[in-house]
Image (spheres, rainbow, N blue to C red):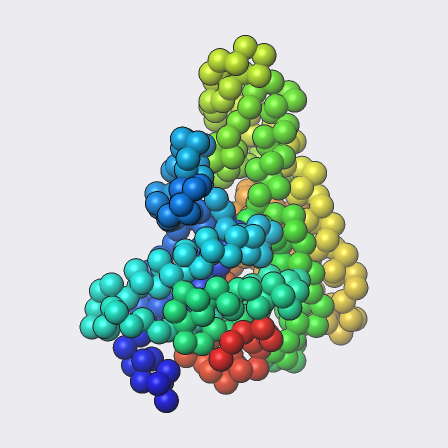
Amino acid sequence: MINRFLGLFSHDVGIDLGTANTLVYVAGKGIVIREPSVVARNKKTKEILAIGTSAKRMVGRTPAMIESVRPLKDGVIADFDATSAMLDHYIKKVHESGTVIPKIPRPLIIIGIPSGVTEVERRAVADAAISAGARKAYLVEEPMAAAIGAELAVEKPRGLFVVDIGGGTTEIAIISYGGIVLGRSVRIAGDEMDEALINFFRLKYSLLLGQPTAESLKHSIGSAVATGKERYAVVRGRDLESGLPRSVRLSEGEVREALSPIVQEIVGHIKDALEEAPPELVSDIMESGIVMAGGGSLITGIDKAVGDATQTEVHIAEDPITCVVRGCGKLLTDRALLEKIHVSGGIK
C-alpha cells in the first residue's frame, strides 16, 4: 500500500544499464538520459565527484587521488557502490523537474541485463536498483528488450533472430512465443574492439592510444568490409620509443584489419547459433531475416559481413543504440507482457 502511494509521486523508468552507456526511459516522456557508464570518485574517501559525460571526460586526465571507473564490466556489475551511486544519480535527476515530489522518488524500474548472467549477478543488479531508491525492480534480458524496442512481435509463435552488439557483450537470441528459444551471451563486443585497435597500432606504429581515442576511431572510420572508398583519420598518442606525443594518419583499411578478428568471432557465434536453431524456426528466420541492434551494429558493413556468413538477409533496427531502453519503456505500459518475460532475480 505504501509503495503504491509513493508510486503516485514517482516516474516509472526503464533503464539500459550498459557497460559503455546508460540510457533512461521515463514513462510518458521517452528517453531523457543518455550518458556514458562512468563514475569519477576520490580514491581515499570514495566521494563521488562526477557521473556520466563529465566523468568520461576525466578518463586518463585525473590526478592520482581521483579515479574514473566503469562500474560494469562485460555487462555485469564490477563495482556495486559505483553502480548504485550512478543509478541513484539518474533516478534523482529524472525526478528533479515536473510535479512529482523530488524528496521521495520511488519508481518502478525495468532494467535490461545480458541473457547469460548468473542468478547472483542478477540479484546484484536488482539490489543496486533497490539501494538507489526503486520500489520494484524487474529484470528483462537485453535481446528480448531489443526485440520489443525494434517493434518485433515477440509473442507470436514465429522465429525471430536478434543480435545486440553492445559495449561489454554481444547478445544473440532466437525468440518465439514470448521467450528465448536459443540464446548466447558472448563477452566479446565494443570494448574488445577498442582493445584490438590499441594493441594493433601499438605493434604497428609503436603508438600508444588511449581508450577514448580508440573508441572515437572505431566510430569514425571503423568498418567490417571494404567500402570502396578509403577514409582517413588523424589520431594522437604517445610514441613508445621516444616517449613524446605523436600524430599518425590512419586509413580505414588499417582499422578494418585491426577489427577483423573481433568481427569474425562475433559473426562466427551468430552463424553457430543459426546452425543450432530448430528447423521450423530457421525457416521463419530465412523469411524475416536477422535484426541487429546495439552500438556495434553501426560499424559500417557489419550487416553485410553477417549476411554473407549466414546467407540470410540482415536488417539494422531503427536507432539501434536505443532499442533495449525503448523495449524497457514499452514494458512499463504493458504489464501483462512484463509479467510473462521478466527473469528471476528482480525484487518486488
Q: Quadrant of the N terminus?
A: bottom left
Residue 67, image quadrant: top left
Q: Is residue 338 above or below residue 303?
A: below
Residue placed farthest to the top in the image?
Answer: 242
Write the residue at 30% across / 60% down: 93
Residue 150 placed where, x, y %? 50, 65
Residue 123 placed where, x, y %? 57, 68
Q: Nearer the viewer, residue 281 or 92?
A: 92
Residue 61, image quadrant: top left
Residue 277 placed where, x, y %? 76, 67
Residue 328 visible to the viewer: no
Residue placed farthest to the left in the image?
Answer: 99
Q: Nearer the viewer, residue 246 or 242?
A: 242
Residue 342 visible to the viewer: yes
Total count of labels = 0
Q: Is residue 157 above or below residue 143?
A: below
Write the residue at 66% across / 65% down: 118
Determine whether, in the image, residue 79 is placed left or right of residue 274.
left
Residue placed farthest to the front in the image?
Answer: 44
Write the residue at 69% across / 60% down: 184
Residue 202, image quadrant: top right
Residue placed farthest to the bottom in the image?
Answer: 1
Residue 233 placed where, x, y %? 48, 26
Write the residue at 46% across / 53% down: 82
